[in-house]
Image (tube, helix red, strand yellow):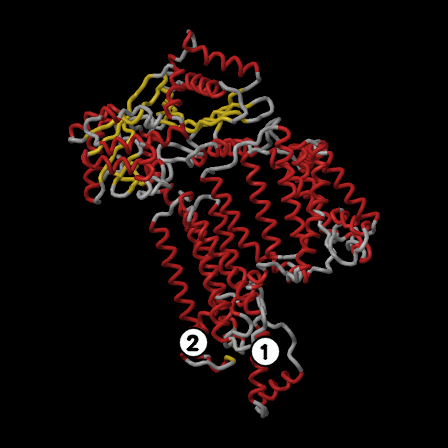
Amino acid sequence: MSAPAGSRLPGRRARGAACRAAGRAGLRGLGRTLRGQPVSLEIAVILVLVAVVSGSIDGGPRDDLRRAVGAGLDGRSSFQAWSATLASVLFAGSLAELVVTILVVLVLVGVSERLLGWRLAIAAYIVTGALATATGIGVQAAGLAVGESWSLQVAYDSTLHPFTPALGTIFAASAFAGSLWRRRIRLLGFAAITTFLLYDGHPAGLYALAGAVAGLVLGVVLRRGSRPVEQQWVRSTHHEARVLLSVLVSMTALGPVVTLLSRAPIGLLAPLGELYRDILPERPLSAGCRLALHHQETGTSRVPSAVGACARAAGLDSLHSPGTVLLSILPLVLLLISASYIRRGRRVAAWAAIVVNVTLALLVAFYQGVLPLAADDSPVVPGHQIERGFLSALAVVVPLAVSAAIGSRLRHFTVRPPQRVVRRYLVRLAAWFAVLVGSFATTAWLARGRFTPAFDLVDLPAVTLQRFVPVGFIGPTRVGPVPTDLPVRILFEAVGPAFWLLAAVGLIAAAHDSSQARAGGPRGALRRILRHGVPGSLSHMATWEGNDYWFGPDGETAVAYRAIGRHAVTTGGPLCPPDRVAETVAAFARWCDDQGLSPVFYSAGSELVTIFESLGWSTLPVGEETLLDPGAFSMTGKKWQDIRTSMNRAAKDDIRAVSTRYVDLRPSIALQIEEISELWVAEKRLPELGFTLGGFDELVDPDVDLMLALDADDRVLAVTSWLPTWRDDEVVGRTLDFMRRHPDSRSGVMEFVIAETVLRARSQGLEFVSLSAAPLAGIDVDTDSDASSQTRRVLQFVADALEPAYGFRSLLAFKRKFQPTFHGLVMAYPDPIDLPAIGTVLARAYLPELSVRQLPQILRSVV
């Protein structure tokens, strides 16, 4: 059957033409990018010309040229000789290094000249390169003068460091970047440079660090000369904290790789990196050993000790295999996997990184500390014991410090796995460990005659457990008995990598299930209830991370709550059909009583007060929700002057409103929203809150709409998110949640975005638009006769503590501009005597970092 006209599939020639057109479009885009960064392009051309003219494009500069221009202390006595070292930033040591340098220059300097302008970019490149060279040589000279060991090792090195000025330039430009990218450039840049310096140790790392510091200082000076410095970074969102912790874990995993790939590493943490190296002696057996082993096989040997030593050497030599390599690198792979899921907020990955780092620290302490001190009978060399002890201690402290950093920030990992997922992972891992240990121990004992040296039953546990430890941790002289025949050696080499591999695969499954199990189970059932329709406009908040769920016996009713202490604090009212509210409240209360919990319905609609009173509960107003009717929405009259002005100003400034979802955003737009979120949190006295306040993480829900304000250059000026309210699988309303604008945007842009959202809702036929509630803004604790004086202080503290940072009262005043209808929200609780504890629970809900012990101290400072 022939295809209709105009629908014929493209043939090979058409596809080739399309590919060529796409390629030409890509080249044009690359050309526009390069034309927009002439400084970086010119520097790249200069580097290539220097390499060609000097004949160093292939294998680097010849020896005499390298000694003349290389940074270092070797053989210089004149000003001209010292001046020549400034050219060390123009030469690369090889063709591969030259290519990488050009790419680094095009990216880093290209970004810098957009931030600084071409004149300041050139100045930063020259100044930071020169300062870094002079500073690095000065540090080496000072170290050499006092006899410092590292300076003695590198005293005669001639170092080429072409990356340094590019690094210095981007650090200088970071002062002109937004808060998000300023912090990322500085923290990630210093982390990478420090990792290279500590694990490699060659002078190029020192020069890079000096260039980064010089750029940092230069950027501060330039920024002060042009405009005021922005407020320093104080807080970060959960998202940004996860990114930084992920980078920290990745650096600790990749640092040893730097050591393994380096030529003669001499960094301070190089000994830690060396622990992952295959340090077994790799040299051919001597002719005498080969002869001794031959005599053993023929039964003519007369020197058993020589045969034993040679058999031992042959056994160690045979262990150079993929199994030994895998056993060394799989712990690092497990850390990298943990880092990947840490970035996604998986708490199980955070705990995995903590456990692995603590395990590695304990192994270092045992094999590099305890055993050498217990068995070291070598003569004491002055300073040797101290140096060895310091390096061993450092190798222990680094992973422990990483574990402490993660453990102290577990609150940022809100994606918690169900207990069954963690239990399944741990049980399976323990079972596999037991199987592997049992298999090897049994085989080793039955085949103990094929090991060298021989061992007895007392040694079997140590021989077995060593199979799960990287050989670099153990050391070549402490490697236990090794098998002398192939079948036993296969098991000998396989059990350790198998365990670490199973741990890595299990972690991937557990981290994946951390979100999938919840989404496919309770949260999936909850979404089905919400789509059928429930009372209230805040119901979608029940789907947020951090909530637990109670379901009625028939699965058609639910309550989202958070267990804090002995209280179950709900996120809104009951989730059920309107005619089953009283039934659901009573059933949830009975369940809480069975679980030893006290129920607290928080932010429930005021229309439920009669139901709560019928149960003998007390209520307390906690907020005001602002509702708009899109069908009756009109911006006429004096009261709407501010809104009309905002709309007119947006039209004049070519600002447009764009309705979209986060999953549909272009990467450039998503990054801008992330930066706006970080800037907003950075300005607050308190950390990013949760509970009834959504943050950046809640934007990714595909059911959540975004309304953006974009200027003509597609710069995001403001962003809002709108939660759905459903009835019979149809969206009938939207509720404002995330509302942030760029600090540089003009006033009125948020009014414009909200007005455009309401107009769009009218065109879609939605029943309502809610501007959400201002938590605690409508509370009047002084008139509540049931509240004790302590409760009034606690609740007032929560309101007062949040107000300076989040401005709920001013937010409520802002929403009044839209002439909304107000709908009261209440808190309902069964026992008034429990109010003081409830006030503390609310403080902990909004301020999860606040401990119970700290609360009275803060109360005294606020009240």
Residue nearest the observer in this picture, 749 or 448: 749
Q: Which secondary structure lies at badge 1?
A: helix
Count of numbered marks: 2
Q: Is residue 108 left or right of residue 67?
A: left
Between 789 and 296, the one nearer to me in the picture: 789
Instruction: In the displayed orientation, state which residue is furthest to the front.
Output: 146
Q: Would you place residue 693 above or below residue 397 in this image?
A: above
- Residue placed most toward the observer, 316 or 293: 316
Which dot marks residue 460?
2
- x and y, in percent, of residue 600 in the image: 25, 35
Q: Is residue 527 visible?
A: no
Q: CA distance from mark 1 to mark 2?
A: 21 Å
Q: Position of residue 439 (x, y in %)?
A: 42, 71
Q: Nearer the viewer, residue 378 or 368?
A: 378
- For the N terminus, the image quarter is top right
Instruction: Determine whether the residue tagged by mark 2 lies in a helix, strand or loop.
Output: helix
**Mark 1 sits on what residue?**
314
The residue located at (31%, 44%) in the rendering is 853
Q: Earlier in the sequence, mark 1 or mark 2?
A: 1
Can the viewer see residue 125?
yes
Which quarter of the image is occupied by the C terminus? top left
What residue is rendered at 50% in x and 62% in y?
393
Most extreme residue toward the top is 637
* Side (left or right) of 195 relative to 579: right
**In the image, residue 370 above or below residue 576:** below
Q: Amino acid at mark 2?
A: Leu
Q: Quadrant of residue 310?
A: bottom right
Query: Label 1 sits on what residue type?
Result: Ala
Specify few, some or many for label 2: CA neighbours under 10 Å numbering under 14, 14-19, or 20 or more.
Answer: some
Q: Position of residue 781 (x, y in %)?
A: 26, 27
> Are the residues at dot 1 and dot 2 in contact (C-beta closer than 8 Å)?
no
Q: Position of residue 188 (x, y in %)?
A: 57, 45
